[in-house]
């Protein structure tokens, strides 16, 4: 599936690069650290901005939404401008209709952008877990270790001298743990969350790119 995913990203290169750009901008807005400035990498996150994971359900939701609003609007503008002329004219007479060439380019750009309109699979899974899951085994271990360190800090406090004030314990640093969504938001945002997860799965398997190729071929052969 990784090979198919990379092929899909190559076929939709303009949209993949633009998707990484919008995600990078969103990371800056949400103050998520960008760990790799390259948008096009030969791995399963190609076309996405590598960033630190969101630890809050609000940031996870906004990251799954914000980059792709502009992406979809721009993609549909290109498709809406290109599709009607391609449906009205016979492309087999392209030499007699040279103005159709820009429409073909616009169609390619629009479909390539729309094919890259979903979060990365890893981001979608983390988004889903912050709404409907719980702590990971690593986070549970961090909580357990912090609790033990906290108890040890209180036990290490010496007994106060007679008439003196008790010494303050030296508390360990709390681990950074995720903030999960409240029950009401789980219900209200359930359709959007399911849409993000399903779209990320489709993109991971290259299905939007395959659909775009089929649509392009159909438009090119229609009279």
Image: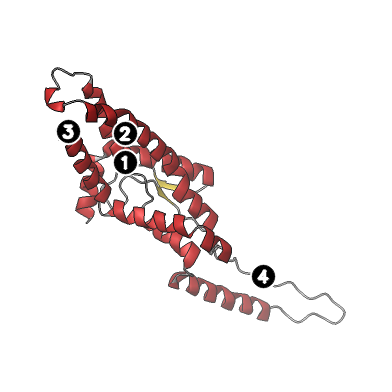
Say which label, 2 or 1, has the lower sequence index: 1
State which quadrant residue 157 falls in.
bottom right
* Horizontal relation, residue 151 to residue 70: left or right: right
Q: Give the number of the mark in front: 4 or 1.
A: 1
Q: In the rendered structure, find residue 170 and report the number of the disc placed on it.
A: 4
Q: Nearer the viewer, residue 94 or 67?
A: 94
Q: Give the number of the mark in front: 2 or 4.
A: 2
Q: Residues within 10 Å of mark 1 (few under 14, many from 20)?
A: many
Q: Are marks 2 and 3 in contact (CB under 8 Å)?
A: no
Q: Which residue is mark 2?
A: 79
Q: CA distance from mark 2 to mark 4?
A: 62 Å
Q: CA distance from mark 4 to mark 1?
A: 49 Å
Q: Give the number of the mark in front: 3 or 4.
A: 3
* Horizontal relation, residue 193 to residue 88: left or right: right
Say which label, 1 or 3, has the lower sequence index: 1
Q: Residues within 10 Å of mark 4 (few under 14, many from 20)?
A: few
Q: Residues within 10 Å of mark 3 (few under 14, many from 20)?
A: some
Q: Nearer the viewer, residue 2 or 142?
A: 2
Residue at the spot 52% in from the left edge and 63% down from the top edge: 187
Residue at the spot 54% in from the left edge and 73% down from the top edge: 143
Number of marks present in the image shown: 4
Q: Quadrant of the N terminus?
A: bottom left
Q: Are marks 2 and 4 in contact (CB under 8 Å)?
A: no
Q: Are marks 2 and 1 in contact (CB under 8 Å)?
A: no
Q: In the rendered structure, find residue 61 and report the number of the disc placed on it.
A: none
Q: Give the number of the mark in front: 1 or 3.
A: 3
Identify the secondary structure beneath mark 4. loop
Identify the secondary structure beneath mark 1. helix
Q: Which residue is mark 3?
A: 220
Identify the secondary structure beneath mark 2. helix
* Horizontal relation, residue 43 to residue 30: left or right: left
């Amino acid at each position: 599936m990784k090979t198919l995913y990379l092929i899909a990203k190559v076929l939709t290169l303009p949209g993949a690069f633009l998707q990484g750009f919008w995600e990078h901008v969103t990371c800056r807005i949400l103050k998520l650290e960008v760990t790799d400035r390259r948008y096009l990498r030969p791995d399963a996150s190609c076309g996405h901005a590598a960033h630190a994971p969101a630890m809050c359900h609000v940031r996870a939701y906004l990251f799954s939404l914000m980059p792709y609003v502009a992406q979809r609007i721009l993609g549909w503008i290109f498709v809406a401008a290109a599709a009607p002329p391609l449906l009205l004219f016979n492309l087999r007479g392209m030499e007699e209709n040279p103005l159709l060439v820009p429409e073909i380019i616009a169609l390619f750009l629009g479909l390539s952008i729309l094919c890259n309109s979903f979060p990365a699979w890893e981001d979608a899974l983390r988004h889903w877990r912050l709404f409907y899951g719980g702590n990971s085994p690593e986070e549970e271990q961090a909580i357990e270790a912090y609790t033990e360190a906290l108890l040890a800090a209180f036990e290490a406090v010496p007994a106060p001298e007679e008439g003196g004030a008790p010494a303050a314990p030296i508390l360990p640093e709390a681990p950074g743990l995720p903030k999960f969504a409240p029950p009401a938001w789980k219900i209200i945002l359930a359709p959007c969350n399911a849409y993000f997860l399903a779209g990320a799965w489709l993109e991971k398997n290259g299905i939007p790119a395959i659909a775009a190729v089929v649509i392009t071929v159909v438009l090119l052969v229609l009279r």
